[in-house]
Image: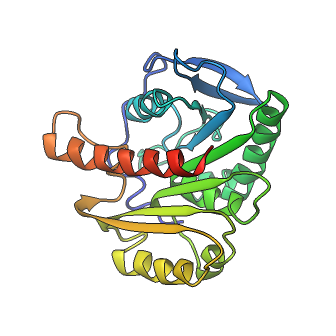
Amino acid sequence: MSTAECCSNPPRLSSSSGDGIIENIGGLNTYVTNSNSNPNSNRAIILISDVFGYEAPNLRKLADKVAASGFLVLLPDFLYGDYLKLDPDFDRQAWLKKHTTDQGCEDAKTLITALRSRGVTSIGAAGFCWGGVVVVKLAKSADYIQAGVVLHPGPLTDNDINEVKIPISILGAEIDHTCPPEQARHFEKILAAKSEIESFVKIYPGVSHGWSVRYDVEDDSAVKSAEESHSDMLNWFIKHIK
């Protein structure tokens, strides 16, 4: 996995950010938030973070925003508190070997089983870079999630995309060496040939990898671009998670 872009602009961590609570679900510490108007929703959205983890303030704000539309939203700590660091002495390759997307997928399946046992009947998942790869792995079966969104994808192959079996949306950045626009458009063609599922691919102009969650809240343009991606993600789930 390339870390050049995943490892830029790390979010400020704060365990107290957001309106939700931390709960252990399926063995994972999970930020859980829902709407006061629909606290017992049987529709859930799982947000899967990038390599900087689930404590990112912007990510928790996004979870709260999605919950306000009537979903139960879960933001699990798939990295078990061990987040990638920018320290030059930090061994990134060892970290990536420890925190594989395959393991993230297995942990997500355990979480989904726990949600089903609580009466959740329809589940969507959105992932950011590392988390987006986990979403695509889940999307290779219709047994786990009913719709997926991948924002500024991590490394994916044609085979990964070709094996997707559920409605999926890919939201990419114009400036992205991990998943350049031409690669995202290539994935779009693969998905378009799969008439049995609905797909949507969009490239956001003038933004870089990570723009949807690692943006400067003081930068109006950055906030506007991030919020556009949030709206597109939410609309996808409103359409497909019933």
- The residue that appears at 46% across and 43% down in the rendered structure is 85
Residue 49, percent across and down?
Answer: 53, 44
Question: Is 191 situated above or below 230?
Answer: below
Indicate the quadrant where residue 34 lies: top right
Q: Nearer the viewer, residue 73 or 222?
A: 73
- The residue that appears at 72% across and 66% down in the rendered structure is 140
Q: Using residue 63 as the reference point, say whether residue 29 is left or right of it.
A: right
Residue 239, percent across and down?
Answer: 52, 50
Question: Is 230 situated above or below 188?
Answer: above
Colour scheme shown: rainbow
Number of numbered markers = 0
Indicate the quadrant where residue 108 lies: top right
Residue 53, percent across and down?
Answer: 52, 38
- The residue that appears at 42% across and 44% down in the rendered structure is 87
Q: Using residue 182 as the reference point, say whether residue 189 is left or right of it.
A: right
Indicate the quadrant where residue 21 lies: top right
Taking the image as drawn, is residue 219 in sight?
A: yes
Q: Nearer the viewer, residue 28 or 92?
A: 28
Q: Nearer the viewer, residue 29 or 168?
A: 168
Q: Quadrant of the C terminus?
A: top right
Residue 152, percent across and down?
Answer: 42, 59
Q: Quadrant of the N terminus?
A: bottom right
Question: Is 193 situated above or below 60?
Answer: below
